Image (tube, rainbow, N blue to C red):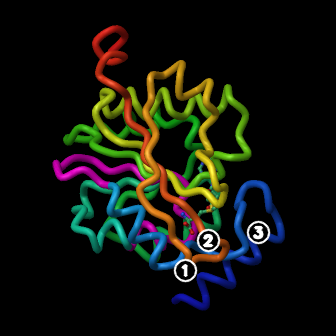
Amino acid sequence: MKNNAEFVFFSKWLKSPMSVASVTPSSTQLAKAMASGLPDKEGLVIELGGGTGPITHALLDAGVRPDHLVVIERDPHFHRYLQKRFPDIKVLCGDALQLTSLIEGLSAKAPTCAVVSGLPLLSMNAHTQKQLLKQSMHLTQGKGPFIQFSYSPSSPLKKTVERELGLASRCVAQVWRNVPPAKVWVYEQNEAYQLRFG
Ligand SMILES: C[S@@+](CC[C@H](N)C(=O)[O-])C[C@H]1O[C@@H](n2cnc3c(N)ncnc32)[C@H](O)[C@@H]1O
């Protein structure tokens, strides 16, 4: 599976480097570091940009119930791949920027407790980043983390977006065993913002 995943990933990157944003899937170490940012409470976990599924696998390994995991992947080829690899979880083929309507369309029973993103956040402009983070905070009611990895040494979320949405950022892991090395960031909405606008 691993070599096949790498081949599928690399061929996709050749066709659309901006959207795939990496030549190889995330390493096991990076995927585990992403999963370790999950909160203790139960609830729906939404993964954005599943690719070939290394983070999906780590989330299940970390104890997320299959019926509490939803993956959104825009590329139809990756979408089919994920459906075959994880037949017990819900994999939606769609644009993460339509997050709210995709999730509300599911009429999920559990409230969302976290959003875990493998999207190329760094290459998005401030408007797009804000759209994405706003919907994520709406779904978690400002109480769940938005977990993101990035190859950049600094936070991939623009400062203006952090400020406008009242977000606090924390780097929770530096993962050297990944190509390229990556950091894991957690964004949470501060309570003052929730009280005023939540
Ligand atoms: C850097 S890859 C990460 C893949 C996988 N999570 C991993 O860690 O190996 C980015 C993934 O996001 C997907 N993607 C990019 N933009 C998207 C969007 N707007 N909505 C949903 N998926 C998107 C790409 O197709 C690709 O699978």
The amino acid beneath tag 3 is Trp
**Does the CB distance between marks 1 and 2 fall below 8 Å?**
yes
**Mark number, residue 181:** 2
Q: Is mark 2 within 8 Å of ligand 1?
A: no
The residues colored magenta run 38-57
Q: Position of residue 193 (x, y in %)?
A: 37, 16
Apparent side of residue 75 relative to residue 197 in the rendered image (left or right) = right
In this rendered view, identify the residue nearer to me: 141 or 158.
158
The amino acid beneath tag 1 is Arg
Q: Earlier in the sequence, mark 2 or mark 3?
A: 3
**Mark number, residue 13:** 3
- Neighbourhood count class around disc 3 (C-alpha, 10 Å): few under 14, some 14–19, many 20 upward: some
Residue projecting furthest to the left: 41
Inter-mark Cα distance, 1 to 2: 6 Å
Q: Which residue is mark 1?
A: 177
Apparent side of residue 45 relative to residue 100 in the rendered image (left or right) = left
